[in-house]
Amino acid sequence: MSVQQGPTPREILAQAVQAAQPEWTVKDHPWKPKQVPKDQAAVAVWRSDLEAISNLELRHTLTVNLYVSRTEGADAEAEADDALDKLLLVIQGTPGLAWSRAERTVFETVFTGWQITATGVSNNVYRQAVLAGE
């Protein structure tokens, strides 16, 4: 049995971020950069939870890590805030997606940034596959 589906909310969000911020490094899977170029950002998006909210729909919980180049001081905070604003606007502006939480984080005592929780809804492709006899 195979499950035919279009792009997942994870893929949709990664593509939307890359289109809106082409100078950023964007990965559609868990990832941490070796470095983040000055005045740029890096983003990793992955599905961290999946829930059947009805027979017809699935809710995808996405974890989105936003990494910035500066690590401390007022300039680092300004860079992180600016990148967060840009990323949240992309999430909020992507049909079918919404963010619910953004938490300031220092990843592995190295990278400054934010961890964002977002959600997206898709058709229940598993139910569809079973009904189609795939």
Image (tube, rainbow, N blue to C red):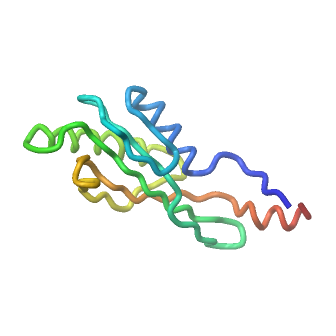
Q: Residue furthest top?
A: 23
Q: Residue furthest right?
A: 133
In this picture, is 13 found above or below 123?
Answer: above
Please report the residue visible at 50 percent of the width from the left and 42 percent of the height from the top: 14
Question: On the rendered structure, is 54 left or right of 45?
Answer: right
Give the position of the C terminus as an image quadrant: bottom right
Please report the residue visible at 23 percent of the width from the left and 39 percent of the height from the top: 82
Question: On the rendered structure, is 57 left or right of 103?
Answer: right
Question: On the rendered structure, is 61 left or right of 3?
Answer: left
Give percent across and percent down for residue 49: 53, 66
* The quarter of the displayed image where residue 116 is located: bottom left
Give percent across and percent down for residue 63: 44, 57
Give the position of the N terminus as an image quadrant: bottom right
* The quarter of the displayed image where residue 33 is located: top left
Please report the residue visible at 59 percent of the width from the left and 70 percent of the height from the top: 51
Along the viewing direction, whichever of 132 and 30 lies nearer the viewer: 30
Please report the residue visible at 53 percent of the width from the left and 37 percent of the height from the top: 15
* The quarter of the displayed image where residue 105 is located: bottom left
Q: Residue furthest left?
A: 74
Question: On the rendered structure, is 78 left or right of 103?
Answer: left
